[in-house]
Amino acid sequence: MTNSSNAVLAVSAADSQAAIAHFSSSFRFETDCWDVHDALTSGQPGFVLLDVRSPAMYQAAHVPGAINLVRGKIVASRLAEYPAHTLFVTYCAGPHCNGAGKAALALAKLGRPVKIMIGGVTGWLDEGFALTTAGAVG
């Protein structure tokens, strides 16, 4: 029975099988700051972390281990040094920014495996993780 007394109850929740399919599928497209941090600190993350913000923002502060590669420079020739199966994880400023999604789309169009680190820099800081200024701009 649907109760429209408030916006939460106005639409019934999905059945369990639909919810399992939906939430399981979302993890194929995204990861979070905690899992990225955990993988990076392991020393063998198994992915390339791309900061897709401007070079100036990257230089000011970025996730340790990230490479700066703005969306407009995501082209096949720039990715040639990485094997075709290399997973890329993109991030931008935070939930208010769609740069990570645009970069992920560009990577997918090039046939590259990709996920978004949800939360971006904002999420990284919210988790209590430090940023760095060391590293080269791509």
Image (cartoon, rainbow, N blue to C red):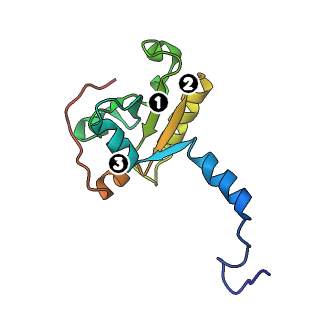
- Disc 3/disc 1 C-alpha distance (Å): 17 Å
Q: Quadrant of the N terminus?
A: bottom right
Depicted 10 relative to depicted 63: above or below: below
Q: Residue at image x 77%, y 80%?
A: 2
Relative vertical location of residue 54 with respect to residue 138 in this rendering, above or below: below
Mark 3 surroundings: few (<14), some (14-19) or many (≥20) residues within 10 A: many
Q: Identify which amino acid the numbered label 1 is placed on.
A: Phe
For mark 1, give the secondary structure.
strand
Mark 2 and mark 1 residues within 8 Å of each other at the beta carbon: yes
Q: Nearer the viewer, residue 49 or 78?
A: 49
Residue matched to label 2: 112
Q: Earlier in the sequence, mark 3 or mark 2?
A: 2
Closer-to-camera residue (76/20):
20
The numbered disc on residue 88 is 1
Q: 10 Å neighbourhood of mark 1: few (<14), some, or many (≥20)?
A: many
Q: Residue at x 45, y 35 (%)?
A: 89
What percent of the width, then of the height, locates residue 78?
44, 16
Q: Residues within 10 Å of mark 2 (few under 14, many from 20)?
A: many
Q: Quadrant of residue 49?
A: top left
Task: Report the mark closest to the observer, 3 or 1.
Answer: 1
| Secondary element at tag 2 | loop
Earlier along the polypeptide chain: callout 2 or callout 1?
A: 1
Relative image position of residue 50 (x, y in whole percent): 40, 32
Circle 3/circle 2 CB separation < 8 Å: no
Amino acid under disc 2: Arg
In the picture, the disc for residue 121 is 3
Q: What element does badge 3 sit on?
A: helix
Judged from this view, the residue extending furthest toward the right is 1
| 36 with respect to 106 (left or right) | left
- Upstream in the sequence, badge 3 or badge 1? 1
